[in-house]
Amino acid sequence: SRSSSRDGADLTVDLSIPFGVSIRGGSQHLSFVKDTPCPKCGGGRSAAKCAVCHGTGKGAPETKEGNVTVPAGAFEGMKLRLHGMGEQGVNGGTPGDLYVVLHVQEHPFVRREKDDLYLDLPITPLEAFQGGEVRCPTFDGNYTITIMPHSQSGRKMRLKGLGVRHADGSGRGDFYAVLQVMMPTGDSPEVKKACETLENAFSRDVRAGVVL
């Protein structure tokens, strides 16, 4: 009877997604296990006397697979609700829902702060000194940015509107290329001589103003 019906339980599963998918959005494969009603008693009142499930009302677990749509701008711990994808109801009860908890994988070069993105962008000593145009990869493709002469490591170059989509749909955050001046790792005499020439170009101790 309808009076003995029981709604299905909600389920929660974890899903690890690539960093880029959290920014752009996209479809991700999902696999999860859920219980099925006992094939003999159906999980109703008669479950207590059922010789198959021995009172649990449950049959063998089954694996379900499918795709879930991750929205652009998804964040760590975000929950997606899939209606009716939880445990089955008993005797006409409503199926439960499935909650997918997103876990965003770290990116080797990009970090996120709220809706802004930060990329550590390597540049050469010559590019830092004389400036010029360099390629900057973003999640919207490659952009060309202009480096000002005498740039230092840590300088931020802003690409407006290329960050994470705001939750209210009002726009996007910004993308920042954080310049990192790289030094050669070899031990050639030419590199050493070039570094000595650079050293002589400083008029004072570069750490003179650092006081704690």
Image: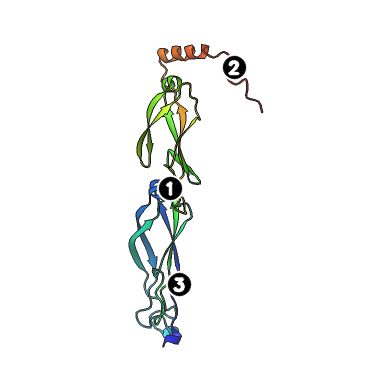
Q: Which of 60 and 168 is in front in this view?
A: 168
Q: Which of marks 2 and 3 is in front?
A: 2
Place of residue 72 in the rendered image (x, y in percent of width and height, measured from the top left)? 40, 51
Cα distance in 3D space between marks 3 and 1:
29 Å
Q: What element carries label 2?
A: loop
Q: Nearer the viewer, residue 5 or 41?
A: 5
Place of residue 189 in the rendered image (x, y in percent of width and height, measured from the top left)? 42, 12
Q: Residue furthest right?
A: 212
- Local packing at callout 3 (Cα closer than 10 Å; few below 14, some 14-19, many 20+) is some
Taking the spot 40% from the left edge, 79% from the top edge, the residue there is 53
- Local packing at callout 1 (Cα closer than 10 Å; few below 14, some 14-19, many 20+) is some
Q: What residue type is labelled 2?
A: Asp
Q: Which amino acid does label 1 sit on?
A: Gln
- Local packing at callout 2 (Cα closer than 10 Å; few below 14, some 14-19, many 20+) is few
Question: What colouring style does the render use?
Answer: rainbow
Read off the residue under disc 3: 9
Q: Which of marks 1 and 2 is in front?
A: 2
Read off the residue under disc 2: 205
Taking the spot 41% from the left edge, 74% from the top edge, the residue there is 95
Residue 45 visible somewhere in the drawing: no
Place of residue 166 in the rendered image (x, y in percent of width and height, measured from the top left)? 46, 50
Q: What element carries label 3?
A: loop
Quadrant the C terminus occupies:
top right
Drawn side of residue 29 relative to residue 170, left or right: left
Place of residue 173 in the rendered image (x, y in percent of width and height, measured from the top left)? 46, 44
Drawn side of residue 76 relative to residue 33, left or right: right
Quadrant the N terminus occupies:
bottom left
Q: Residue 105 carries which label?
A: 1
Q: Earlier in the sequence, mark 1 or mark 2?
A: 1
